[in-house]
Image: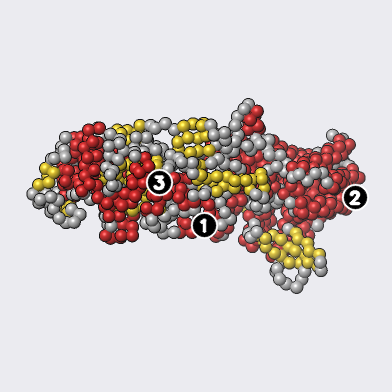
Amino acid sequence: MNQPIRRLAAALFVAFALLILDVTYLQVVAGPRYRADDRNPRVVASRTGKERGLILSADEQVLAQSNADPNNLQRFNRSYPEAELYAHLVGFSSVNFGDDGLELVYADDLRSKRDLTLSDLLSALLGGDLRPKSIQLTINHGLQQIAYEALGNQRGSVVAFRPDTGEVLAMVSRPSFDPNVFLGSQAIAAREDLLADPDEPLANRSTNRTYPPGSTFKVIVTGAAIESGIAGSDTLFPDSLELELPGTIEVIQNFDRQVCGNGTEVNLQTAFRRSCNTVFGLLGLQLGAEALALEAEAFGFNLDTPFEIPVLNSVFPQPADFSSDLPALAQSAIGQRDVRATPLEMALVAAAIANDGIIMEPMMVSRIFDADGEAVSEAEPELLQRAVSPSTAAIISDLMERVVASGTGTRATVPNVRVAGKTGTAETGVGPPHVWFIGFAPVEQPTIALAVLVESGGEAGENATGGSVAAPIAQEILAYWVQRNG
Amino acid sequence: MTRSAEAALLLGAATIAAFGVALVNLARGDGIDAQVALTFVVMAASFGGFHIAVRQWSPDASPYLLPLAAILTAIGFVEVYRLNRALASLQRWWLLIATLLAVSLLLAVRRSGLAPLRRYRYVFLLAGLLLLLLPLLPADWAFPLRGFEQNGSRLWIRLEAGPLRLQFQPGEIAKLVLATFLASYLSERQAVLAAQTQPLGRYRLPELRQLAPLVIAWAASFVVLVYQRDLGASLLLFSLFIAMLYAATGRPVYLATGGFLFGAGAVATWMVFPHVQRRVSAWLDPFADFLDTGYQVAQSLFAFGSGSLSGSGLGLGSPDRIPNAPTDFIFAAVGEELGLAGSVAVIATYGLLVAVGFGISLRSRDTFRKLLAGGLSFVLGLQTFLIIGGVTRLLPLTGITLPFMSYGGSSLLANFLLLALLARVSHEERT
């Protein structure tokens, strides 16, 4: 009888050995992961109430701060004085939901390192700085306010860059939300409400939503045409009422169902100025899928965009997708069908033309500085890629200036300033069109390039066009900026 | 090891409990108070009393049992104190009551030995089944003894007489009573059960009549499972039956049949009961449904991970974040505050205690005592494995207590009685 009892005992000892292996795994191998997990209440408890650094705009406006708790001087309360204005960029640091936005990306710098662990005490003894660091953005607070107000209660986005450095001057997404509600006692209910809102206030439309770019995509088609030598400003195209699409009974018409010029022939300059779909559809067919896709990628489509916060890729379909679908190619050339772009991407397109064909890497954090105000690191402008040659950029810049001077974008005109731009009115198939304006100013020495997007026509609804809805918003922003920065 | 060495170790365990309480106080900034002395006095009185009773009435008992149980009780008590002081002062009372009962048991069998336990086996069978079924008493009838439900399982009875309200989990005692019955029954029938005379195709089975206890075992654990919705107790009872049947006969066919029956039962309950499905999915991925079904286990894993090698120190972690920390999840609290060092030490101590129990069983010459000690050691070891495995996600979670460490009167009482039985068996085998 001892034999089976020994076996039972042996089985239990194997089981106990497994327990020891298991706790060793939990506490040593997987331990660091569990210790750092955002859902671990110890992590959250150690974080809340701790001091975090400031987040400032370029002109030193406070966007996020930690103030000592009046009831408990050991604790700090985080707050976001500008509330909705920077919600999608700054994000929040919440007990319930962890960190988001720049609060998440720069959490290591912003957090106080004082947590009484042995390694921190050691590093303090060796002269390490445990105080929280602060970050300063490239965003201009005045411009951000103007952009936010110019969009009004319409769903949409504004993205503005300094074209020669890639610094973000303004980045707005509406509707927005107040990040302070994520810190309060009503955080969970507030988040439920925001998630349930059909207007999706939590979505960052500037970087995380893509839209058909419509006629603003003609900037890229023009680039491809000039670079490949197929066409120049003065090249003549047939000026017809409609473009018959090969192999179908579908046609492309111009916006107002009219001809573009005199009804017989029209040059590229006029076609661009008046945004003629017939001409650009034909140009797309002449260029071919390969050349169009290459040019779109030169402008940043289909590529990961390096940026402080995540950016959704803008999409131009693969050339193979068009091999048996030439109508789709023609429609893609006017920014419809499956072409999709973020407002950030279209602002980069405008910035590329403004900066002699070169796209600078977008950035919105200019420096990190310590509690003494000493810079810990400063961001340097980085070249991302060349979109077009300087001469091509100059030609397109001229075409775009004519759009504002006497084309579809006249409502972006700023008195005594040379403004270049391109409008876009993208059909969605359902509901009113998404309307665009991309542009830059002053043409002779651009200091700002931007993209304005208003979803579903905004307040104008079905009647909205890029020229009537988006261009006036761009006008306010450009006027404000150029007035102060030449 | 001498009796004096045993006494010294028991005193050491009481001192560790007192120091632990002092550390918890200091960690909270409360300073040293009467709790420290009170803990020392209760621990010393409890284990001292047990020790003296063993010296008096079972002088040849193994000296290793009490010190191992004492250190586990001490560590468990400190964590319970750290989590909930009100529970800790109740636990002190339970400790004294449990000791009193264990001492009474030793006193009662001082002359007769364990023979009466063997003789009245059907009384024990009946008592065991009754105890198992007690929680099914109506919750709202006039009789002051009522069953009730807690945390989704109907495991409790409550005695209400005027201002007195006593709650108890009779299942904890049932496992001792049934182990006694089985040891007695099997020691007598082992030859018949091992014979396997009944032909079934190529195989031979024992006489079907002899299989009755197996059927009763399966039925009893199934009743517990279905009516009381308690996976842990059911698995524990069933494994105890199968293990003792195997120990008595040496026939692996019982293990295989038992395994098959349990497997079939497990699959069936998994299909029928949504709460079993939730337990299993929480086991497979506690983070998939973090805020609901996976919450408990996930919090336990966070506690272990945060404990790391050396732990946060007593009173310095956050084991209070784990639901049910003082009872089912007490081991996670140990893992966080004493670290890997503490959790491995505790598992090793259980291993030693179980080894001492099996050693007593292996050295026994009498079949009844051999099976009794073996069965009790097995059920102690298995219960420890199931609950520690449950909180470390090695196994699906089953709501049972960790012997000696978890808060709870029934559990403490049952395990002290188990200690007394093991001590008595080892005494009788040496004289």
- Subunit under mark 1: A
Of residues B31 and B399, which is closer to you in this image?
B31
Residue at 32 percent across and 35 percent down: it is: A359
Looking at the image, what colour scheme do you see? secondary structure
Question: Foreground residue, A267 or B254?
Answer: A267
- Disc 2 versus disc 1: nearer the observer: 1
* Residue furthest top in the image: A126
- Distance in Å between CA atoms under marks 2 and 1: 72 Å
**Horizontal arrangement in the rendering, residue A266 relative to residue A24 (left or right):** left
Q: Residues within 10 Å of mark 1 (few under 14, many from 20)?
A: some
Say which amino acid is labelled 2: Arg
| N-term-proximal mark, 1 vs 3 | 3
Q: Left or right of A167: which side holds B84?
A: right
Task: Tell me if mark 2 has few (under 14), some (14-19) or many (20+) residues whose alpha carbon lies within 10 angstroms of its own.
Answer: few
Mark toward the viewer: 1 or 3:
3
Q: Are marks 1 and 3 in contact (CB under 8 Å)?
A: no
Label 1: element kind: helix
- Residue at 73% x, 72% y is B141
Q: Are marks 2 and 3 on the same chain?
A: no
On the image, numbered disc 1 is attached to which residue? A190
- The picture places residue B415, in percent across and down from the top left corner, at 77, 49
Which quarter of the picture shows residue A250?
bottom left
Q: How far, Cα to Cα, is label 1 from label 3?
A: 29 Å
Instruction: Provide the chain ID for the residue under circle 2.
Output: B
Q: Amino acid at mark 3?
A: Leu
> How far across and down, in percent of the image, does residue B294 sit?
57, 51
Q: Are marks 1 and 3 on the same chain?
A: yes
Q: Position of residue A375 (x, y in %)?
A: 51, 32
Badge 3 is on which residue? A143
Query: Which residue is tagged 2?
Result: B111
Q: Do marks 2 and 1 share a chain? A: no
